[in-house]
Image (cartoon, rainbow, N blue to C red):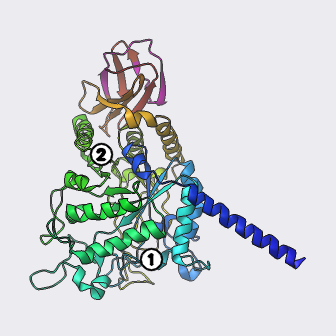
Amino acid sequence: MKTFYKSLILAATLLYTCTTALAQENYTNNARKLFTDNNAVIYEINIRTFNAKDTNHNDIIDFDLDEESGNFLNAIERLDEIKDMGINTLHVLPVTQVGKTKALGTAGSLYAAASFNKLNEQLKDSKSNMDIIEQAEKFVEEAHKRGIRIILDIPACGAYDLYLQRPELFVKDKDQIPVVPADWTDVRLLDAGSEEIVNPDVFGVYKEFVDLAIDELGVDGIRADVAHCKPAEFWRQLISYSRKKDPQFLWLAESSDSWHDAISPYGVFTTYDKLLEAGFDGYYGSFFNLKEWDTSDKLINHVLFNTELAKKFSVPKSVIGSFSTHDEVAPVLVNGIPYSKMIIWLNSTLPVNAYYVDGFATGDNYIYDWANQKADITFTDDDYYFAHRGKIDIFNFSRMPAGNNKELLKEFVTANKFRNSISPVLANGRFVRLKTNNEHIFAYTMTDNKTTIVVFGNLNFENTEKTDIKIPELKKQTEYECIKSTKTAPLIRNRKITVNLAAGEIGVLLFKNLEIK
């Protein structure tokens, strides 16, 4: 009987192995095309907090109380939730080893890379017999089974720990001291070389990361942190190297047309257009400035700028809806829930790739009571809980990002489903600005043949605004579906729509038989 059970277990193990291998074999990376078709819905996560088990709800992971931080294996538990939310791509914040010397926070910043070819042991489930590479592979594999692509973040700088090991990788000042970029005191600036001569040592380090990402982990792309601090030629060579391994490998540059300065007088600055020319599939744009745009011209003009920018290249390019990133204060702290809802529907109806931060969908404000207070226990040489107020924590072993706004979550899921239903329009349609007589109200359409989405919103987050939206092709009897309702229903008439919008309100209508010329 024991022999029978052993045989049964062996057969089951072989079946699982074969099924898993088949799932991976059948998975084909299409991240690059998905992105350039404006059909990626990207969710930024920090594995260290993604499924952290904060059982006593004090916002920090108390290992002495057997609480568990996020790791590659327990992250798998949330993948069905992620899929059900309508997300098809995860941007995973850095998973490389972090520095512990001259550190920020009790766990160390995710962006203080102590290695570019070794994974962060903090992300390993100690209860499993699998090594950390196997655990990371398992996470990627399970994401792929659910149709979720994985793009990894590659840090722009090296930790002080890495400088002590390999000083030749770093930029030095006139006194031969490693350069601290901007005010990032926990990292030092890597010397990537120039347009004429790429530094082979730093290039080799990044090449090892690409090998790790593609050959060992099987991920679908890379998001390059502060991409503008390296020469375009550096990226051209690295991207070309990756595309020989996987032609569909996605490259997203953290770069903006709003940024004009190097992060250090000793560093280089490469403009966003040069990065796109070098092979990046997309960049951040400047949608994070929405919080400062009080007139429709600023929003509409930036969309038009990006649609024109994409036409300048012989291969497809795109942009993300960077309205909220981990470098931005939580939208609920900026203009409340209406602002979050506006971001959701802009991301779902503009010719961009939707982009959100873990916790956004439920209204997390990322406020931690212990922030910047002295810690009882630390795993670095910093004994303070360093934190950026209102931003997702990347410095400590903190709680899982989450708010408690179920209404916002419902709208998030609804908008993503709608976005998926109009994917051909976002991929092939035209963006058209609609005329209004109120500078605070934006109005636009995305139109493809006779399928037209009409979107209007009030950028005044303090007062109600009213306007007429002119649509010459519109007839009073044209049928439409209200996708995102407003408190006051719009009045549809020949050639125009009259809207009365509450502060920060946005509305979306779908016309199935309206062709905008």
Is 55 situated left or right of 445 in this image? right
Extreme residue in the bottom direction: 164
Q: Is residue 42 visible?
A: yes
Where does label 2 land, which residue? 315
Percent from the top left, x then y, of residue 373? 38, 76
**Span highlighted in magenta in the image:** 466-491
- 440 on left or right of 105: left
Q: Give the number of the mark in front: 2 or 1.
A: 2
Task: Tell me the distance, in whole angstroms, between the alpha carbons under discs 2 and 1.
Answer: 35 Å
Disc 1: CA contacts within 10 A as few (<14), some (14-19) or many (>=20): many
Which residue, as the protein is rendered here, is positioned at the far right? 1
* Relative vertical location of residue 283 with respect to residue 229 in this rendering, above or below: above
Label 1 SS: loop
Q: Earlier in the sequence, mark 2 or mark 1?
A: 1
Q: Is residue 243 above or below residue 136?
A: above
> Residue at image x 29%, y 58%?
254
Return the mark for residue 120. 1
Quarter of the view holding residue 207:
bottom left
